[in-house]
Structure formats: C-alpha cells, structure tokens
Amino acid sequence: MMVIALASMSCVERHPANFGEITAVYFNNRVQGNVLCDTTDVTFVYEDEDRMTVPVAVQLLGRTAAYDRPVDISVTSDNAEEGTDYILPESSSVVLPADGTSFEYNVILLRTEALKTAKKEIILELHANEFFSLAVPELEQTTDTVSTVRYRIQFSDMFTEAPAAWDESILGTFSQAKFELICDVLDIDPADFNDAAVMTLPRQMFIYNEITSYIEDETAKMERGEPFDEQIIDPQTNRPIEFPS
C-alpha cells in the first residue's frame, strides 16, 4: 500500500500549501487547466483603449496577519521604460492586506507606436523582506519547471496569427494593415474577428464590399493629387491594400 501511495503522489503536481511556521509569498498566476505559468504574452490588437491592465497574482504561503504587510517586488526591462511603456502601482499599495491570503499587483501597459514593430518585455521579481521569505522559488509541473519568484510580461501591438474568424476566401490574405483599415473605417470591434458567431460570412461579404469601395474612392483621390486616407497604403508594397477580385 505504501508503494501505491508513493506512486500516486509522484503523478500529482506538487504545489505550495499553507503549513507550519513558514511565512512566504510567491507568484501564483495560472492559465487554463489550473497550470501555473511564469510568463504572459499580450497584445493590444484587440483593444480599443491605449492602456491595458495586467494583474499579477501574489499568493501567501503561511499564516495570515491582522495588519498589512509590504511585499518587495522589483521590475526591470531591457527595452521598456517606466512611464512611457508601463506604469507600476504606488509602492505604498504593494502590500498583502490584513487577514488576506493574496493580492493583485496591477501593471498598466501603454500602447505606443513602437509596439507595432517590436515586442517589449518587463520582468517582475519578488524579494525577501522582514515580513516574507521566498520558501518556494520554483515549482515542478508535469511538463516543465516554472519560477514562482519571477514573472515575465511580454507585450506588443502585433498579430502572431490571423484572428480565428478571418475568412481568406472573402477578405484575402491576412495582414495587420488590412485588419486595422477595416476596423477603423467600418468602426468594427477588433475582438469580433475572434468570434465566428459574430463575424459571419454574410457580414464579411458586407465588409468586403464596403472596404473595397472605400479603397477605390481613396485611391482615386490619391491619383488626382487630393488629400486621401493614407491608411489604405500597404506598408509592405507602398501600394493600395488589395482584396480578392
């Protein structure tokens, strides 16, 4: 029976639990399937606002206390600048609240023009202080080992692949320039393109008809030397964006 018990334990993810006299904190950010992760990759392409809040969960390991306890978190980056690319919480608010077992450290990301061509990254790191140790610096899972004291946030304003509902037979090969033109001119929520129930084929046919007509009109203005919407120009070809004929 002991052998069976040990074998079954070896197949279960090991994770921190409140026990003994340990008083520690760790990053506890999980994705689908309750899998702990130490990196998140986000994009502004589906956002209407120029700010995005990324909550980072900080978890207590040990006993609660009847008073607020400061948590020491540092943030570094090789290519992002505080105030220009991101905003951090006031240091006075970075505390585990009285009687609390967790809190969220909210990082505000800022949309900049640079994010259209390059991904930026910031790294959060927990440090021990007079209130908390770092009892569990990493966690072994079934497929990998993740850090519980360092958390990486990567962000951009670029696509890594076409939205789920984009139909190439109607709208042609996907490009970010084409996508942004459609959303801006027709006032479409970018997130609609990730929902096939919303972005139906008839709706995409309507988009095709409207946007190709718009490009024709703006191209005619350009050829006459009149002011035109420069967003119709594909930055890759320096010609008007093309759709299937």
Image (spheres, rainbow, N blue to C red):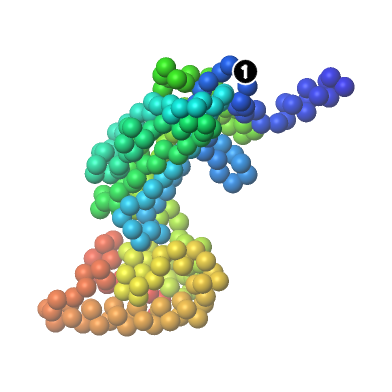
77 vs 181, nearest the viewer? 77
156 vs 217, nearest the viewer? 156
The answer to whether residue 147 is seen in the rendering is: no
Residue 3 percent location from the top left of the image: 83, 20
Q: Residue at x 43, y 81 (%)?
A: 206
Q: Quadrant of the C terminus?
A: bottom left
Residue 153 percent location from the top left of the image: 40, 40
Residue type at mark 1 is Gly
Label 1 residue SS: loop
Above or below: residue 44 compared with residue 79:
below
- To which residue does mark 1 refer? 20
Q: Quadrant of residue 136?
A: top right
Q: Residue at x 78, y 22 (%)?
A: 6
Q: Quadrant of the N terminus?
A: top right
Q: Residue at x 52, y 66 (%)?
A: 195
The answer to whether residue 179 is seen in the rendering is: yes
Of all residues shown, which one is farthest toward the front?
66
90 vs 10, nearest the viewer? 90
Above or below: residue 161 compared with residue 209:
above
Residue 12 percent location from the top left of the image: 70, 31
| Figure disc tally | 1
